[in-house]
Every structure is written in structure tokens, then in C-alpha cells.
């Protein structure tokens, strides 16, 4: 079993010192020392852990934020390759590299087959070892519960589950069983719930005070591959039956905020509140997809609830992404694509966040599709390197994202990775960024030759942001974020862009640049460097963030003329 050690940079808020403070107060009031000692013995460790605040999500102003030990937290993360964390030996040299890259959170796969190799016999030594390694590297963990499904398939289910196809039925496609567990299998759901609950109970026991584990991903990219739905006897019977009233009631109650294509489909079939799946959603594969979304969602909401009943930290489901045109089954049918997230929400409220696995080139459009209707942007899997180094500014700055996490981080980790520059710079300004995410006065952007400018309105000004240009040469790419620090003051961070300011209303005085100061933050303290007022900002013409090297600048404005 893993030992519980303190994180080098401060453990759970006030655990030990809080107990000592209480002891002092109580001693001076009513209790004698022996009674106090007795009291301390009878306060169970679990009960003490509950007294400290667990990692949780909280709506703070304009943003939903992850709160860790009482403070908002940005996940500068990375996801390990699928099987890396199955060996502690393999992981040993990887942690220091992840630390050097600037990660504060490691998305760590954990498979059902390894923790319950025989039914009812649990082995948590891997969990404990990973926690020990993470703590030694000063990293947090998000565990990925790879159980009934991983990328649609069921490869990480224990062999005792795989072998028993009568008790744990398979999806059927074209008259044959395939290697995908059917989400209609009640015994499978119960076995998965049981294992996940045991895992969460164990994590509570070994980490309930330290909060190394911040969140859980439940399953991975679920959905039927190869056909648009399960055709097993149980699935056929359910498909020919009525759409559950709970789903149609949800559609009615949330009509105004339903994802547009789901609402259009429901409308096109007459907004029915009862009927079979094809009656309510039409006789196409879209009905199959909605049916599968309901089946997977019901199962996974139940698994999530069972885990939360043991240890209530935030949990999310991730999804493979596909546009609106390919037929379901070419991608996992039923996975929480934007058009069926409402179906998942109708099935239960245990899953806190729906997260895209965002590799698609149109990063901004996909981010917006997920940051809506109370769903914060949470990136569990995305591109790293140069693309990630830029996109992280958009995700955390423009969409108030909670997490950024490039996939396969263990093979990418190196200090020369451009992602390291972004993570180190964002870590410097993290406390400020969190405050401004919640105040709603921060904007992030990614620019290239096709999208070379963007305007924002903030703090009484219109900000015109464009690709950096000096001596007549425009750079190829730029990215960054800008936040309003105070009246007439802005902070910009990133590279390859420039910014000019127009006061609103435009009829008043014009804005001049009083000062541009580059610098850095150390432990939250601003350390000014050069004052830039020559070629570096075109003689006071704009704020300018050179290409090749991320910088932080504070820009102060003044008004002149009428
Ligand atoms: C998405 C999956 O969720 C991951 O587990 C992983 O295998 C990647 N795709 C690979 O690109």
C-alpha cells in the first residue's frame, strides 16, 4: 500500500495545522488533554479527509473552475500513452521529464484488468506506486478508468469478463458477436460499478487528504464501431420499445438550449413525447446513434455514480470527434459528440464534464461546441508540440478552459518542446489568469496567415490583435492572451503578435501608449525588465510580441486629443 507523503509545495489546506489550531482552542476552553486525545482517536481519517475540501468544480463568475485545496487550479497536463502506466519501472524515468516540461497534472490510464485480475480480488499496488511516483515528482494525477470500453473496444476488460459472454454479453453486428461489451448487459454494468467503486474507495483511503488525484475519466471514447447500433437480442427489444419518458421529458424541458442538430431532428419528426426510437427520431442511423448514446450514458452515469458514492471528486467522459456527415459506426456510435451530449445529460447528472479528444484542425470551432450550456472546456486529449503551444493560450484564455493535455506526452517530453515554453509562461501568470477567467476579462487567440487578425472589446477599448510585423515582414504564426489588469492597463503574453487599442466610444480622446514593460512573475510578484519604447513597439505605436520566444508585457495607455 502506498505511503501518504506531503506534497513539497504545501499539502491539503490546513490538514495538520488546522487540527493543531483546533486542539489549542479546545484546550483553552473545555477539554482536558486525555479527552482530547480520545477525541482525536475517534475522528476517523476518512472523516477528517471529508473536512478538508475535496477537489471540486465551482462556478466562479464567468468561469467554472476546478478548486483544489480551496484555490482554483489550471491543469497544465499531458496524457500518457495507453499502456505506459501499467509498469512502474517503465514510468520511473518519465516523471522527471514531465516535470521539466512544466506539467502539473498527468493523465494516467488505469485499466480494470490490472486492478481486478480475478473477480472480487483487487490489487491496488499499481495505484499506490503511481501515487508515490507522482508525489515525488510533484505532479497531480487524473486517472483514466479504462474498463468496459476503450476506443469503442473492450480490450482492457479483465479476461474473466471477456471469457464469459453469456454473463457479459457482446454487441452484435450483422448477426455476430464482436469484441465490444454490450452496454445493455446489466451484469457487466454491475461488475464495472463494483470495481470502480472499489477503486474510488481505495483512492479516498490513500489520497483523501493529499489530493494528488484531482479528477477521474470514466471509460474512454465509448461507442459501437462497425455498425450504427448494437443488434443483440436485448438491444433489438429495447430499440423496438418506447423511448424512455425521462429522455423526452428532458428534451421538452431543455428545448431552448438543445444542441441545434438534435433539436432540428426532433422537430423534423414532430417533437413527439412518446413513441419508438424511429418514431421519435426518424428511421435513419441518427436514431441508432441516439439510442446508443442513451444506452452508454445510462451505463456510464451509473458507474460514475457508484464511484462518486465512495469518493466524490469531479468525473468526466471523453469523446472521439466526428463531423455531422459520416455515418455512426464509422466512429463510435453513441459517444458524447456535441449532438448527443443532451442525451447523455438526460440519462443522469453524475458526469460533470463532456470532453473532446480534439485533434481536428479546426480547434477553435470544436472548442466552442464543447464550451456551452454549462459544459466547461476540458481538454483531456489534444495535439502537443507547436500546435499545442499555441492552442493552450486560446483554450485557457478565450474559453476559460480548465485543462489542456496533449496525448502521448511521454514520448514527446523534452525541454526543447515548444509546449514547455507555453506551460512555464502560463504557470508564471496562472493566479492572475484564473482571476481574469472568472472576471471574464481575458481573451486568447491563435493567428496564422489565413486568420491574421482578431478584435476584442474589453475594459473600455477595442483591441486589434494581428500577426506581428516588423521592418515590413509579417510573421507566419502568432498566439497569446491579453487580460485587463486595471483601468488603462493590460497584460499580454505569447509570441508573434501585435496589438493596438481604440477607446470606446471612438469619439473621445485617442489612446497613446504610456509604457510597455516586459518582465516576468516570480511567486506572483511582477519583476519588470526592459522598458520598450523604440523599434520594439514601433515608437509607441502598439504592443509587440516578437516571434521566436514567448514574452510577457504590461502595457499602460493614456488619452490624448479629442
Ligand atoms: C484517442 C484515444 O482516446 C487514445 O486512447 C489514443 O489511443 C489516441 N486516440 C491515439 O491517437
Image: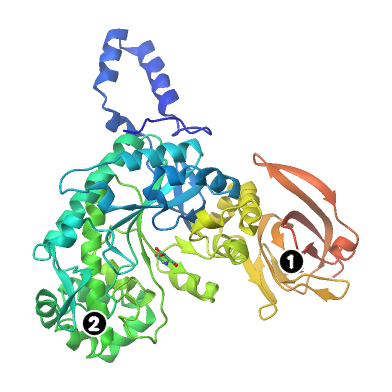
- Report the residue at 26% width, 76% height from top: 251
Q: Secondary structure at mark 1?
A: loop
Based on the displayed image, in which of its 4 quarters is residue 499 positioned?
bottom right
Which tag, 2 or 1, sits closer to the chain's start?
Answer: 2
Rendering coords of residue 363 (x, y %): 53, 72
The answer, for residue 160, to whether it is visible in the render is: yes
In this view of the protein, which residue sits in the foreground, 402 or 101?
Answer: 101
Q: Secondary structure at mark 2?
A: helix
Rendering coords of residue 97 (x, y %): 56, 47
Asked whether, in this view, residue 531 is left or right of residue 303, the answer is right
**Vertical comparison of 472 with 536: above or below:** below
Based on the displayed image, in which of its 4 quarters is residue 355 positioned?
bottom left
- Report the residue at 17% width, 70% height from top: 170
**Vertical comparison of 128 with 160: above or below:** above
**Vertical comparison of 303 with 542: above or below:** above
- Neighbour tally class for label 1: few under 14, some 14-19, many 20 plus, Cα within 10 Å: many
CB contact under 8 Å: marks 2 and 1: no
Q: Which residue is mark 2?
A: 288
Asked whether, in this view, residue 15 is left or right of residue 419, the answer is left
Q: Which label sits on residue 496?
A: 1
Quadrant location of the C terminus? Answer: bottom right
Q: CA distance from mark 2 to mark 1?
A: 47 Å
**Vertical comparison of 64 with 212: above or below:** below
Q: Which label sits on residue 400?
A: none
Rendering coords of residue 379 (x, y %): 47, 62
Amino acid at each position: 500500500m502506498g505511503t501518504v507523503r506531503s506534497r513539497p509545495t504545501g499539502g491539503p489546506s490546513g490538514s495538520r495545522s488546522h487540527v493543531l489550531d483546533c486542539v489549542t482552542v479546545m484546550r483553552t476552553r473545555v477539554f482536558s488533554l486525555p479527552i482530547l486525545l480520545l477525541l482525536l482517536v475517534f475522528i476517523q481519517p476518512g472523516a477528517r479527509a471529508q473536512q478538508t475540501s475535496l477537489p471540486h468544480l465551482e462556478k466562479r463568475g464567468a468561469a467554472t473552475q476546478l478548486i483544489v485545496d480551496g484555490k482554483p487550479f489550471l491543469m497544465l497536463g499531458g496524457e500518457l500513452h495507453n499502456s505506459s502506466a501499467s509498469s512502474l519501472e517503465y514510468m520511473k524515468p518519465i516523471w522527471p521529464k514531465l516535470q521539466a516540461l512544466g506539467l502539473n497534472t498527468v493523465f494516467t490510464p488505469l485499466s480494470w484488468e490490472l486492478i481486478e485480475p480475478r473477480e472480487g480480488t483487487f490489487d491496488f499496488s499499481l495505484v499506490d506506486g503511481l501515487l508515490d511516483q507522482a508525489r515525488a515528482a510533484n505532479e497531480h494525477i487524473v486517472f483514466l478508468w479504462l474498463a468496459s470500453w476503450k476506443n469503442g473496444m473492450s480490450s482492457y476488460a479483465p479476461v474473466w469478463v471477456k471469457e464469459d459472454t453469456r454473463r457479459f454479453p457482446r454487441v452484435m453486428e450483422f448477426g455476430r458477436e464482436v469484441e465490444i461489451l454490450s452496454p445493455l448487459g446489466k451484469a457487466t454494468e454491475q461488475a464495472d460499478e463494483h470495481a470502480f467503486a472499489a477503486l474510488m474507495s481505495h483512492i479516498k483511503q490513500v489520497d483523501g487528504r493529499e489530493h494528488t488525484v484531482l479528477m477521474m475519466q470514466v471509460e474512454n471514447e465509448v461507442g459501437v464501431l462497425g455498425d450504427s447500433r448494437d443488434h443483440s437480442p436485448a438491444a433489438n427489444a429495447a430499440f423496438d420499445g418506447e423511448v424512455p419518458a425521462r429522455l423526452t421529458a428532458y428534451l421538452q424541458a431543455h428545448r431552448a438550449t438543445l444542441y441545434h442538430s438534435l433539436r432540428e431532428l426532433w422537430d423534423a419528426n414532430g417533437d413527439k413525447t412518446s413513441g419508438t426510437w424511429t418514431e421519435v427520431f426518424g428511421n435513419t442511423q441518427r436514431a441508432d446513434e441516439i439510442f446508443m448514446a442513451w444506452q452508454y450514458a445510462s451505463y456510464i452515469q451509473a458507474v460514475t455514480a457508484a464511484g462518486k458514492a465512495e469518493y466524490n471528486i469531479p468525473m468526466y467522459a471523453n469523446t472521439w470527434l466526428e463531423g455531422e456527415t459520416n455515418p455512426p459506426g464509422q466512429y463510435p456510435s453513441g459517444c458524447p459528440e456535441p449532438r448527443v451530449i443532451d442525451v447523455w445529460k438526460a440519462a443522469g447528472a453524475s458526469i460533470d464534464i463532456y470532453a473532446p479528444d480534439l485533434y481536428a484542425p479546426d480547434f477553435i470551432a470544436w472548442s466552442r461546441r464543447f464550451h456551452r450550456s454549462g459544459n466547461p472546456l476540458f481538454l483531456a486529449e489534444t495535439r502537443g508540440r507547436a500546435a499545442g503551444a499555441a492552442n493552450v493560450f486560446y483554450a485557457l484564455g478565450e474559453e476559460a478552459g480548465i485543462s489542456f493535455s496533449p496525448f502521448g506526452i511521454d514520448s514527446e517530453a523534452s525541454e526543447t518542446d515548444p509546449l514547455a515554453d507555453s506551460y512555464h509562461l502560463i504557470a508564471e501568470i496562472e493566479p492572475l489568469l484564473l482571476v481574469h477567467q472568472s472576471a471574464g476579462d481575458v481573451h486568447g487567440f491563435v493567428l496564422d496567415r489565413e486568420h491574421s487578425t482578431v478584435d476584442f472589446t474589453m475594459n473600455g477599448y477595442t483591441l486589434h490583435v494581428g500577426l506581428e510585423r516588423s521592418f515590413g515582414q509579417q510573421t507566419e504564426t502568432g498566439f497569446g492572451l491579453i487580460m485587463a489588469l486595471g483601468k488603462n492597463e493590460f497584460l499580454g503574453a505569447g509570441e508573434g503578435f501585435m496589438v493596438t487599442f481604440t477607446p470606446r466610444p471612438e469619439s473621445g480622446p485617442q489612446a497613446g501608449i504610456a509604457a510597455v514593460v516586459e518582465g516576468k512573475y516570480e511567486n506572483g510578484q511582477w519583476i519588470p525588465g526592459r522598458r520598450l519604447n523604440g523599434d520594439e513597439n514601433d515608437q509607441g505605436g502598439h504592443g509587440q510580441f516578437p516571434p521566436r520566444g514567448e514574452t510577457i508585457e504590461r502595457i499602460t495607455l493614456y488619452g490624448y486629443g479629442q
